Amino acid sequence: MRVGIEVGGTFTDLVVVDDTGVRTSKVPSTPARPDEGAMNAIDAAGIDPTEITELVHGSTVATNAVLERKGARVCLFVTKGTRDILLLQRHDRASIYDLRYRKPEPVVPRRDTFEVDERLAADGRVVRALDEAASEALVRDALAQGDYQAAAICFLHSYADPTHEEALARIIRAVAPEMTVTCSSEVTREFREYERASTTTLAAYVQPVIAGYVTRFSETLAARGFAGRFSIMQSNGGRMPAEAMARNAIAALFSGPAAGVVGAVRGVERAGYRDLITLDMGGTSTDVSLIADGEPELAAMTKIDGLPVKTPVVDIVTVGAGGGSIAWADDGGLLRAGPRSAGATPGPACYGRGGELPTITDAHLIRGTLRSDTFLGGRMDVDAEASRRVFAPLAERFGLSLEEIADSAIRLAEANIVRAIQQVSTERGRDPRDYVLVPFGGAGPLHAARVAEDLNIATVVVPPNAGVLSAAGLLLSDHVHYRARTRRLRVTAETIAEIRATVEELQEEARDYLASLGIEADARFARVLEMRYVGQAFEVAVNLGDRVLGDLSADDLSELFAEAHRRIFEFAKPHGDPVEVVSFRVGAKAPPPETVTVKTQDSPSGSAERRARLVERGEALDAALLPRQALGVSALPGPLLIEDGSSTIYVPPGWSARLDATGNVILERES
Amino acid sequence: MAVSPVDQAVITRALIAAADEMGVKLIRSAHSPVVREAQDCSAAIMDREGRVVAQADLIPIQLGSVTHTFRACLELHPLETLEEGDFLINNDPYAGGQHLPDIFLFSPIFLDGTLIGVTATVVHHIDLGGGAPGLNPNAGDVHEEGITFPPSRYSVERDWKGGPFERLVRANVRMPEATIGDINAQFAANAVGGERLKDLCRKFGTETVFDAMDEMLDYSERRIRAAISAAPDGVYTGEAWLDDDGRGEEPVPVRATLTIDGDAIAVDFTGTADQVRTNMNSPYASSISSAIACIKAVLTDPDIPFNEGAERAITVTAPYGSILNPKPPAPVRARLLPSYRVVNSVMNALAKAVPDRVIAPGFDTTTVSCLSHRGEAGYNIYLEIFGGGFGAGAENDGCDAVDSMLSNCSNIPIEAMESDYPFFRVDDYSLRSASGGAGRQRGGMGFQRIYRILEEDVTFATYGDRFRIAPEGVFGGAPGAKAETFVERGGQKIPLASKQQFPLIPDDRLVVRTGGGGGYGPVTERASTLVSSDEHDGFEGNVA
């Protein structure tokens, strides 16, 4: 029996797969002790923990530790002269006209930052050797200043040679054997000291929290007789055995959204879709990402609470457009939708929990694209009158009918989502027309067709179990481990051997690491070189794909780079212009031992065909209202509203809907 | 014709997103660290009449003046004469430009033969010739500061791409690969903006986009006017002082008279010092941008799109021949120094109208740190732009060690610097304890950077201010610390002036210290928790 448990902000979802098929359960999350919610989900599904052979878990524990500033007390060791590295940051302001601007607050204060007298040059040469005896005295003195649970080390140019960092780590471990020690060269071996220091301190900050969480959860599971394999989702969309994650917690910082993307990718892969754009729309925001050839794109850097994190993360763009997003008019008279949200409490006005502001969910009730009698499969009572009441002032202000203003608000939210998708597609040189749109989350399928239309996407694929896709994604994910290294090498016939050797070396390291965790499956490799024209400072990610390393010539590599550069910047320099590799990122991926087929669940069949009146894009429509299971393989023309458990699929006029062989609902635009 | 609310909102956001994308791509494809790491550049989209409708939020001073810079081009080359494949260029401080290094590049965008708009980028280029690499603090006129590209029209295919104009540029700059690379990045960003503009016109129809652009200007104007209306009518004066003109020791005054009348503001700088011999003159376009940026920051929400509509409610005048509207051929390279005193004098005047909305004076100075090395392989020029501490607000300590408000340059990572400029090493980069003016709210701290010189033939060039006159505190707050620069050579300390050039030798330690911001309110009222927090962090000087 295999179980995936995804702890979200509001709900904890569980998917279980065994010989008898697939079951799901959904229970409220328990934010203070997320593992309790997870155990509740196991109990709610009626699962005997002794029968679980494989448990995959995703949670927001690491994210929340940072956002709520509940991580460990960390001491930071830096090169002499750089004590203020976390406070100086990059000397810029995120909001340029804000006179009262404050920088993001680092997780380690100045009082806990200590300078070590050592120095390397940019090429790794030792300028000032690390004096072991003096360093030990310094470490003893530093550790006496606070009740530290973890230590972080970030020395200048340690990406070029980690020897000094490793030496200090040994000294700290000798002085304080219980202390977790994190070296920057281990977390992210890439240049730019502030970003690396920020990542390293965040890693140290969440480490004891995750370690404690994993240990406690493991013990609870063990006490209930669980003896299977326990692994955890990482930000890069792959999983890691829990005991390894307890040593590399930073990798789990964005595990939640990543699981959803993996669920979507694996969910539609059996139907042959490998190029997709995912659209995960929830209550407060929408996450979008682009998947080319079955692999989620990874971003080399992201931010949390304004602080940079340099670890590979599934490249997700988040926009403040969700069911709870508030429609409003600004003081210049422009209609806006979001980014402010009524969230889950008070929530949309129709929830009757005190929400008095017009939201996207309210707009759907007014327009008729959501219905009070079938809201959340009929499990929730909503007050459509309240929706109309809160939209009335806005309608009056713009001189529109209630239906028109509701329709406009929804179109604005959809336009915000379109722009987010353009960020991951058009702006990165990818044509959205080459992709299918895969919506999930409560509200995704309701907007997908119109969003697709704006992007000239012809096909929308709604996977089964769209509501628990993240939990399913956990079970479907690979074991993944990434290694990165900064090594500047100009691409020439002379250096290509060294470039190939570096990739080879990282492949071996990543594979050996997986093997050390007992994961022996044949690993595939994702190999990305960060490259640029000599003289540029920002790199373009060049994916080697499945190219055979031994055949890779300097010309091939330069050409791959030129293609990638052209795609993003719409130009490339003439062939022969010098090109260099700056960093290498290599991931080893081991697939799960057997594939899991998550099939759609049968829900009680609906009654005879019903009709729904709705207003959409300015037109009054009479749409058929169907349950998902009423769909067949032959296409039905829109307008249709398809009730699908916890979500509704909207099929506009000009689109059709059908079921495919693997249980996906396929929406297609008439050409 | 009125555009529907939803189309209006969608087009507005799409144009702002397109300008942002231009900015991001400009930075990421540029060559010089001053663009790619420090981000000293801007991007904008203009309508078919050459009015700025959307801008990337990058450098406030550059953004405000795009319109003026383009106007000068249009006087010679009216819009109706432009053709597909043309570009316009201008860096002439006496024809709508700012200072020479900021090259403005404009690309007219056509769809089916019709001009639908213009995309614009401006980049601070690392070296454009002149009397010294990167920066010539001794320039006696604008010609010694580098090459001027007066407002001109060229063809990309004929004149750039190996053509005569590209060869002219290449022949007149010290780091041609960097300069040509950065101009190419400008062309690429303009092209990206052009594609987005064309997509919008194809989708919504050209006329709808034009109407939506008109409304964007009106929208910003309405919001600015609404904000001005909320401030009390009256005539308010303010002043601020520069240390000196870079040669003498006499302080140089900037005086502002603000007239708030209903929903409009007029700013007049009569009474401001005459132009000076050195490079501290602010071209008219810079002076206007600075005054508008300050008024916008004080009176309005940060989310009002800054475009030409925003300028309709504000008029700015400065006497011809003054430091804020100089006559040619006065040198202008350090124009941000008087521009910041424009900000201080306008803020000082606004403090009398809306005391709760202003902050204390900050360090408010651009300090340029330029190190150049002439080696076997030619010139290698490092240039970085430093801010300092922000002034404190009524309820917040000033931001520490951040670029000043007219600019927004990032620092260059030490690891990037030492990799690109092997002729020096950074020994220290730290906050200056006790540099923020004490107060109930403390001024932001300045910082120090220490460079160790590793090679022969290295020259330091700089300009800065607030070496003599510190930023005042307000409502009982103490002033922020002053700036200083010196060289440690064999146990000796050689003080440097705020504007000068200085040859360095191996093992010199060059120390650059920027100042802090003024405090707000008496320090005796500072919360004890803040005092003890500063103490714990080893920050001194902010105690009663």
Image (cartoon, coloured by chain):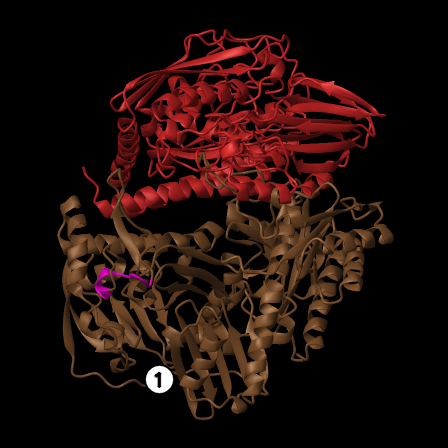
Chain colours: A brown, B red
Q: Is residue B436 magenta?
A: no
- Which quadrant does the N terminus of chain B fall into? top left
Indicate the amino acid at tag 1: Gln
Q: Secondary structure at mark 1?
A: loop
Query: B459 or A559, which lies in front?
Result: B459
Which residue is at the far bottom? A20
Left or right of A382: which side holds A20?
right
Q: Mark 1 Cα within 10 Å, few/some/many (few <14, many 20+)? A: some
Residue extent of the magenta highlight: A344-352
Dominant secondary structure (helix, strand or loop) of the stretch shown in magenta: loop
Residue B67 shows up from this direction? no
Q: Quadrant of residue B4?
A: top left
In this figure, which residue is indicated by the disc labeled 1?
A: A601
> Residue, x 33% and y 39% (percent of image)?
B112
Q: How many marks?
A: 1
Q: Quadrant of residue A367?
A: bottom left
Does B42 sit above or below residue A645?
A: above
Q: In x, y percent, where is residue A482?
A: 64, 65
Does A174 sit above or below residue B172?
A: below
| Label 1: chain letter | A
Q: Is residue A346 magenta?
A: yes
> Residue, x 71% and y 76% (percent of image)?
A516
Does A422 sit above or below residue A23?
A: above
Residue B322 shows up from this direction? yes
Query: A512 or A218, which lies in front?
Result: A218
Q: In x, y percent, where is residue A98?
A: 44, 36
Left or right of A360: which side holds B377?
right
Q: In x, y percent, where is residue B418?
A: 73, 39
Q: In x, y percent, where is residue B436?
A: 58, 31
> Residue, x 15% and y 77% (percent of image)?
A610
Does A33 sit above or below residue A528?
A: below
Query: B322 or B489, which lies in front?
Result: B489
